[in-house]
Structure formats: structure tokens, C-alpha cells
Image (cartoon, coloured by chain):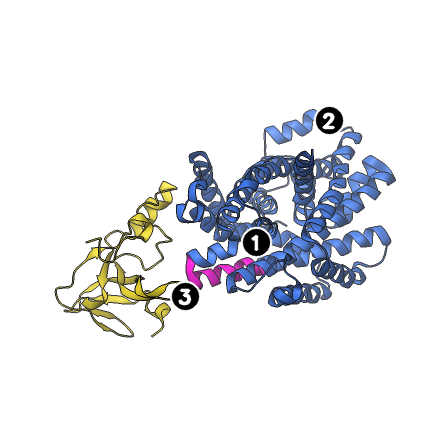
Amino acid sequence: MKRLLGVALGILTAIGGFVDIGDLVTNAVVGSRFGLSLVWVVAVGVVGICLFANMSGRVAAASGRATFEVIRERLGPRAGLANLSASFLINLMTVTAEIGGVALALQLASSVHYLLWIPVAAVAVWLVIWRVKFSIMENVTGLLGLTLIVFAVALFLLKPDWGVLAGQALAPAVPDGETVPTYWYYAIALFGAAMTPYEVFFFSSGAVEEGWTVKDLVQSRLNVLVGFPLGGLLSVAIAGCAAVVLLPAGIAVTSLSQVILPVAEGAGKLGLAFVLVGVVAATFGAALETTLSSGYTLAQFFGWSWGKFRRPVQAARFHLAMIICLLVGLAVLATGVDPVLVTEYSVVFSAIALPLTYLPILIVSNDPQYMGQHVNGRAVNVLGMAYLVIILVASLAAIPLMIVTGAGS
Amino acid sequence: MILGDLLGTPVRDADGGRLGRVADVRFVLDGTPRQLMSEARVLGLVVSPHSAASFLGYERINLAQPWPLANLLRWRHRGSYLVLWEDIAMVGKDAVRLRPGFTRYSASLEDGGRQRAGDGK
């Protein structure tokens, strides 16, 4: 019974933890401009993140090494440092976006300007990281994030023409008024939102935090393989809501209030209450994960002691690094830059940086000296190579498409 | 001398002909046993004619998966070989010069690198 509860809890946490500000904004933007014609990208992204999380989780459980420890060992100091710099900066961008997202959601709930909420959000993130136990932190934000299911409820209550939605999803075409490069630019953004690198830093470091061994692999695989696809369905519901309400009205999403507008229309005040709780929980949870990831990546690369399982005094540099990252994020947001805009860029840059972390994990998960008998099977390797190609193409195409489309405008 | 600076340095034979670049430095653990492990001793340099980039672990011949990657990396390092430290005449800033009549040993590692020094002739 206890084991069953553990599995259920893990899956629910994975669903609630899947959606962050990147998924919220990108899915709503894409839904409002392209309908459901990019839903296939969410599917590709979800399979990809399942694959990546499965490999990095297995590496962590079999070798006791988290992602950046592996990268440092396999790529050496020089290539490893270049890799760290890129991954770290993009992660910092995501931290900024998530904290901005928390503040924007609190503004919607309270009518107090978001700039006033930003220091509150950052201090709250720091306090949780400093004080709260890893498992409690994970489970509370994950479970509260489940309230985002209200997007799916709202979609049903909006009584859409399901035939039209299915047509958009199953026979993807570039809608009138949008260009082919813009379509592909948003395809990469959506891919980056689903397959954000921090999810994997966090997942593999979390495996070390919770002291996984190969015995825990079955449960972790179950969490990922059930939880992430259901989280992907939430993403589709967000896009669906936008496609039903905002696309016909000609509203292209540029703010968080527009993301949740269809929920208010479909599910009323109660729905609005749920979605606000969900957005705060999802962005706050992701703010914790990204802030921890920035500490994890730095500490793992430089060989500092790290982890929430240690008291802060025993992992001082790890905690100090996270405080500095939060302050940098605060400083960026204090300039008044639009957090939604930061989010839109962060998901594309995530896609650009993805090969840097994906390739070393793919290689090491095949290395019997790290993995023993738990090396990748044939099916995982075929899929792994296919995704290496997809990830490389998305990464290389992102910058040219960004220039050609003026970042999707 | 910093080892990192040596990586990528061009390697020339005694007549000054270009052989490739230093892709790796090979160590053996056969010194006095210490608390954690034996002292490491430089066995030699791995010279790669086509690429000075890392082998990413694929110098160990028991590592063959995923095969497109393994083959690609082996192809990038085709023709690479190990030169023993004794066969090196001079390590300079711009080039490493080898002694005349140096021996090319196989650069690949068998059994995950656990074999004895100089086995792979």
C-alpha cells in the first residue's frame, strides 16, 4: 500500500511539475496563433524528455553521478567549462522567467503590481531552498500544480468544435497570416519548452539527493513515463483553450492574463481561482527547480559539496551560488523587462543548448564502466540517436529562424 | 608545463614532417602505492592525424554503442597511435618533436584500459 502511494505520489508530482512558465506561455502563444497545428511538437518533446530523463536518471542511480559531474569527467575541463557557461546562462534566464512568472500570477490574484511581488517571490524561493526538505518541496508544488487540470476542464466547458480541433492537430498546416519560418520557429520554441535542460539537471541531481540506487529505477521510470505524458496533455489543453477562445478573436498572447483568459471564460470564477493557484504553484515549483539547478550545475562542475541533504553550512558555496543567482534574476527583472518576453527567449535558447547536455549523457549511459549492466538497450539507443539528430537540427536551425522571423513576431 | 596546453600541439617527426596533433596523454598507474592509488606515470602521447578533439571515451574498444557515434568518433581519429615518452625528443611550445625511428603503438585500450602498459603493440 505504501509503495502504491509512493508511485501515485511520484506520478502526480511529475504531472504537476511538468508545466512551468515556458510551457504556459509558449503553448498559449502557439494556440492563439497556430491553433493545434503544432501539437505534434509537444508529442515529440514529451517522448524526448522521457528518454533524456530516463537516461540521466539511470546514470545517476547506477554511477551516483549527476549530469554535470558526468559532463566534467567526460568532456574535460575546457569543453566542459564552455558547456557549463552556456547551460548555466540559459538556466539563469529560466530562473528569471520563473520568478517573473510567480510575480505576474500574484499580480493577477491581488492587483498589486508584479514588480512589487518580485522581491517577495525571490525571498520565498530562497527560504524554501534554505529550509524545506527536498521531498516536501517537490510534493507540495507538484500536487498544487495539478490544479492546472482546470485548463482541460475549461476546454470541455467551452464546448469547442472537436472536429475542427482534431483537424488542426491531425493535419497540421500553417494557418493564413503566418509564414512557414514562423511556424518552424515556434515549433522549436515548443520543443525547447517541453525539453528544457534544467528538468534533467534537476531530475538527475534529485536522484542523488534522494539517494537512488538501481532498485529505485523501476519507480523512477514509471513516474517519468506516466507523469510526463500526462503533463504533456496539460500543455495541449493550454494550447487548446487558446485555440478555441483567442485564435478566432485574433488575440495573439503577449501576457499571462491572456494565457488564463480562456479558463475564466470557460470555467468562471472558480476556474479562475484554480488556475491562479496552479500558475503560482507551477512557476514557484519551477523557480525552485531552476534555482537549485544553477547551484547543482556549478557545484558539480567545480567539485563543491552540494545538495539539500547537507546542512547549508556544509554546502556553503552551493547555497551562496544560488543566492547570487536569485539576486541576478532580481536585478534583471528590476529593469522592468517583460517576464513573458524573457520566457519566450529562454525556451528557444534552451533548445539551442540542449545538445550540450544530451550528447554526454547519451555517451555515458552506454559506458559499462559507469553503468555496469544498466547500459542503454538497443531500443533506447535507436531512439537516442534519432533524438540526437532532432535535437541537433533544432539547435542549429534556431538562430537563423530567430533572425529571419524577428523572433517570431 | 601544463598538460592542457599540450593538447592540440602539432607533432613532427625528426625531419620536421607533420604527423598530426596531440589528442590525449596516456598515463599508467604503476608507481608506489599511496593512500588512494598508485602514483601516475606518463606513458606517452596519443597522436591523431585528423583531429585533436577528445575521443570521448571511445578509445576503449569494448565501447561500441551507440554505433553511429562510436563509428563517427573512431573515423575522426582514424590512424591515431600512441608514442611512448622515451620516443619524444623535445616538447616545445609550438611543436612536439619525435626521435628518429620512434614506434607507433595502438592507441586503443582493451578491457576498459585495465591492461598492462605497452601491451597494445
Give the foreground label among 2 and 1: 1
Percent of width and height locating residue A138 = 69, 48
Q: Which residue is mark 3?
A: B35
User: What is the CA distance from the residue labelled 2 to the residue labelled 1?
Assistant: 35 Å
Up the image or down, A359 lies above or below A50; here it is below
* Residue A81 lies within the magenta run: yes
Output the letter for the chain in yellow.
B
Percent of width and height locating residue A188 = 56, 45
User: What is the CA distance from the residue labelled 3 to the residue labelled 1?
Assistant: 45 Å
Q: Which residue is mark 2?
A: A161
Asked if both marks, 2 and 1, belong to the same chain, the answer given is: yes
* Residue A394 lies within the magenta run: no
Tell me which secondary structure the magenta stretch mostly adopts: helix
Q: Are the two marked residues, 3 and 1, in contact with CB atoms closer than 8 angstroms? A: no
Give the foreground label among 2 and 3: 3
Chain under disc 1: A
Estimate how packed mark 3 is, as few (under 14), some (14 to 19) or many (20 or more) residues with alpha carbons within 10 Å: few
- Quarter of the image for the C terminus of chain B: give it: bottom left
Kind of residue at disc 1: Phe
* Label annotation for residue A349: 1
Pick whichever, A398 or A24, lies toward us: A24
Range shown magenta: A75-89
Estimate how packed mark 2 is, as few (under 14), some (14 to 19) or many (20 or more) residues with alpha carbons within 10 Å: few
Percent of width and height locating residue A379 = 45, 34
SS for dot 1:
helix
